[in-house]
Image (spheres, coloured by chain):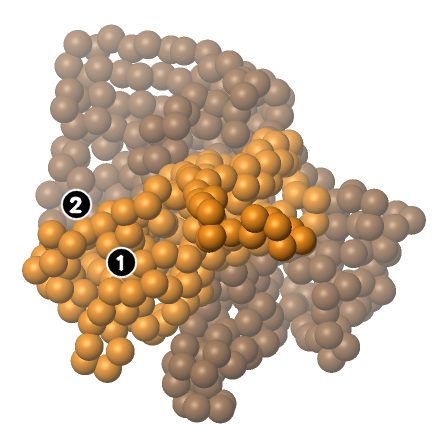
Amino acid sequence: MDGKSITVAGLGTIGSYLVELLLRRSGIGRLLLVDPDSYSESNLRNQHIGRRDVGRPKVAAVARRLAELRPDVEVIPLVSAVEKMPLGLLRCDAILGCTDSRASRRYLSEAAVHLGVPFVDAGVLALPALARVTIYAPAPEAACLQCSWSPEDYAQQEQTYPCSRAASPSSGTPAWLGAIAAGMQVAALERALRAGGPDVSQEIVLDPHSGRSIETKLRRHNGCRFEHRRWTVGKVGGVDITLGQLLGGTPVGRARCAAIRVEHHAVVLDRICTTCGRRVRVLRLAERPGRLRTTCKGCGAATAVAGMNLTAELQFADLRRGELRRTLKAMGVAEHDILALVCADGAEHHVEVGPGPDRGA
Amino acid sequence: MDGPTKAFLANAAAEAADLAASSDLLHIQPGPGSLPDRYLITYCCNGVFKDGATVNTRLGTFALGIWFPPDYLRYADPQKVLTWLGPMNVFHPNIAFGLPVVCLRIEPAQRLGDIVHAAYDLVRYAKVTMDERDALNPEACAWARDHTAEFPVDRRPLRRRQVVIRSRGMMKKEGGAQ
């Protein structure tokens, strides 16, 4: 495991124990920590934190502790939900999932298949006490998380409704169970990173009280809603590259780029005034509005974004003349985002946005 | 576009055509392309409006936009999938007054027909929240609790054929003969 780059998503009951176990063994060169939350008073009961961590972003608190433990390891804290971080940051040697969110797990699983990265997911059940670790092999023919999902599993994913005001309940998982799951996850990571890696997905469930465990090999489901497709990801210049340069300066094969997608992001085409109906062309990623003006230039009323004004794929034929000069940065695209360049013949080529100014194709 | 999504969109297009042909209360405008991923749904039915301080029930035209994002089979974000397109003075607990926001529970891979029926039930107050904590329009919520005897405000089913009444003196055949 020399010099490996590992991503840990979630620093709660399992993740807070996991990260120290990871760094107390050799082989990790880089650790990316991802969690959008901060530690609260109630977390002292079941998470591996101290009183000085309360109120601090989880990733910052953990990164500080890890720096004291292993200053030789590059630890990168990212205060973000996994769904909002640049997808290219997940291009690493392994992804360790410690979230309590079905939607986040599904997202990580899909990213792992696309990027060809082993995904080791852990979970616990407080009553009865069970610890689970699942290794999802990166091979397209291996089972993914969704291969075992029923329609009920999809329906139980967390959603944000505009009328929803319910607070998410805190986990009642005891600390010792989280620590056991973390240990299992480290062992599973070693299996996942062994030379050649796993070619079959498998799951281990442990009952700590009885000491019994069940290991299951998971099979790919032909009717899986997720199309197991691995991307080959190249590089493209930095965020200062323009849409016109992507169209004209990056011919892919024999066909030029006809459309562009920012993977896992929707683009806002227009904002609409809720009073006079005036449309304002925006062309910006929905989850990264930046400092966009949100009031109507005509009547001063608030403008809103609606689903019908979003698109997943920006067709170059629909762009207005001046918009070809629009840079990726102005659209809200960040370094490490992954773009899909869609050719006129339907072929797709994935590229990761790199650092620095673009120097052409 | 992946295979499962293509199949879903093809089914949705067929469903849209079938629904439009079976209802005179409904118009469905698909988006461009052979596999449209968005639809404009227009209902012509009774609904509730607020004009100034006056709340009244009357016939109206209601528009809803539906977009199926590429990952719709696996994750349904209702704020992306559904857009309330008007009228903006519609008065309903689940529709934000003056905004293109409607609160309707949808699940991943939910069929177009199911969404269209659910939205119709919402517009005509056959399905409505009575709890301000779940409402986008608390005032409409309070109004709804006092008027439940009137619901639904339109009792016609969505799937119906227009009944053509032929009666002597009411309709003339082409050419003027009766």
Which chain is brown in the rendering?
A
> Is residue A273 shown above or below B134?
below
- In the image, A163 versus B122, the foreground residue is B122
What residue is at 43 percent from the left and 21 percent from the top?
A148
Question: Label 2 is placed on what type of residue?
Answer: Pro
> Is residue A232 shown above or below A361?
above
**SS for tag 1?**
loop
Q: Say left or right for B149 vs A38.
A: left
> Is residue A330 shown above or below B165?
below
Colour seen for chain B: orange
What residue is at 62 percent from the left and 25 percent from the top?
A140
Which percent across, then down, holds residue B76? 42, 45
Residue A121 picture quarter: top left
Give the class, few, some or many, for how many residues have Cα within 10 Å of label 1's Cα (few <14, many ≥20). many
Residue A250 picture quarter: bottom right
Residue A169: which disc? 2
Q: Say left or right for A289 vs A133.
A: right
Q: Say left or right for A4 vs A124.
A: right
What residue would you read off at disc 1? B94
Q: Which chain contains the residue that carries disc 1?
A: B
What residue is at 29 percent from the left and 10 percent from the top?
A213
What residue is at 19 percent from the left and 80 percent from the top?
B53
Which percent across, then down, holds residue B69? 53, 48
- In the image, A214 versus A265, the foreground residue is A265
Which percent across, then down, holds residue A68? 33, 53
User: Is any atom of residue A168 visible in this view?
Assistant: yes
- In the image, A309 versus A324, the foreground residue is A309
Question: Label 1 is placed on what type of residue?
Answer: Asn
